[in-house]
Amino acid sequence: MRPIQMVDLKQQYLHIKDEVDTAIQSVLNSSVFIGGKAVQDFSENLAAWTGSRHVIPCANGTDALQIAMMALGLEPGDEVITPSFTYIATTEVVALLRLKPVFVEVDSRTYCMDPDSLERAITPRTRAIVPVHLYGQSAPMEEILAIARRHGLPVVEDNAQAIGARYAFSNGEVRQTGTMGTIGTTSFFPSKNLGCYGDGGAIFTQDDVLADRIRMIANHGQRIRYHHDIVGCNSRLDAIQAAILDVKLKRLDAYIEARRRAAAAYDTAFAGEERIVTPYVSTRSTHVYHQYTLQLEGVDRDDLQQYLADRSIPSMIYYPVPAHRQRMFTDLGAGGEDLPVTDRLTGRVVSLPIHTEMEPEQTEAIVSAVVDFIHKK
Ligand SMILES: *Cc1c(COP(=O)(O)O)cnc(C)c1O
């Protein structure tokens, strides 16, 4: 059996080596390293694949969030509502832009923004809502968009973890995550479901005016070279990364299927275990299993992680400290909200290895180690 890793990028590369190497070589041959055909082609292909009118590539998923919030024209002190249970990038850019992060609860089963908590957090100073499609399934966008519409607020979807997930509205309309809100963002960090071999990100919108503004912001605020109309930044996806992403985009459906097979094997194996809560999948969303995250009931998580590590099985806590308790924010006078669901989840989640190259014998080894540990106690 191959060594078990949280994500096996090496094995994935070996399966697509010829095509990736050729794609990289063709960028080297062209020597167009920034912009050009590779970036253009990938952006168009991703737009077609996601059903998004516009895809604007950028340097990483954190920049994507920052540029999205800059494009909305928010003013210092404006309140931006995000879940506390997320990766730091979602909330950090809010503070970076001198906006005020307001943290809300997630649903304890889906780990995504709780619409009731969102509704309660809205004040006259609220200017944007940033749901996160955490672990690979969609936040409840119908409810979130209805609240946003009622209050006239834009919605930025952080889709770094759920690219390819589909959400069904009650009228039967089905949309991909990242394409439902005012703006969507994603990351191509290597371990993401669509990852490159370095850093990368993209911004999605269905609005022509916003798309133009986003393109300008990502390119020093210029539409015409050396004519800078607004303050922007420098955020580009490079051509080599775009060429690699194009190779992997063709396989993204198959990659998602591979993750689902691994998740299904875990689900089946853990089904009878009372002290393990397996991922709940909302009836409205599909799940692309960026993470396979369990909740443990009455199990010492540190001991379990150590037990697994002793058997060369990695596991991770996403995320051990929620945003509302991060010094970064509490030192700014933000955070400190009372979020019991988030605090409870933070103490009991554990993510197991899941990736596109999982072998049945690896899932079996992980399952039996977890089950052995739980029954020993
Ligand atoms: C990975 C991630 C990001 C940031 O992406 P980078 O490319 O690392 O900047 C933002 N939000 C979430 C939820 C993520 O998982």
Image (cartoon, helix red, strand yellow):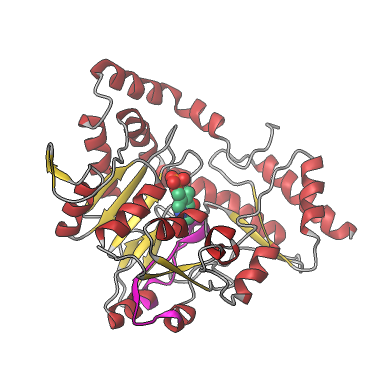
131 within the magenta span: yes
Q: Position of residue 88 (x, y in %)?
A: 51, 55
How far across and how far down the image is residue 279, in percent? Answer: 60, 63
Q: Which residue of the protein is positioned furthest toward the top in this rendering?
A: 29
Task: Please name whichever residue, 136 or 115, is drawn nearer the observer in this view of the structure.
Answer: 115
Identify which residue is drawn at 26% across, 29% down.
34
x then y, percent, for residue 13: 49, 29
The magenta stretch spans residue 237: no
Along the viewing direction, whichever of 274 and 103 lies nearer the viewer: 103
Up/down of 307 relative to 134, above or below: above
Quarter-wise, where is residue 80 in the image?
Answer: bottom left
Report x, y in % for residue 2: 68, 31
Q: In the shown orientation, is residue 213 left or right of residue 65?
A: left
Foreground of the two, 20 or 365: 20
Q: Is residue 353 left or right of residue 258?
A: right
The residue shown at (37%, 31%) is: 244
Q: Is residue 106 above or below residue 349?
A: below
Magenta-drawn segment: 121-143
Residue shown at the point (70%, 57%) measured from the top left: 269
Residue 193, visible in the rendered structure: no
Q: Which is more toward the observer, 334 or 261?
A: 334
Q: The C terminus lies in which quarter of the figure?
A: bottom right
Residue 39: quadrant of the picture = top left
Residue at horizontal 49 percent and vertical 79 percent from the top: 117
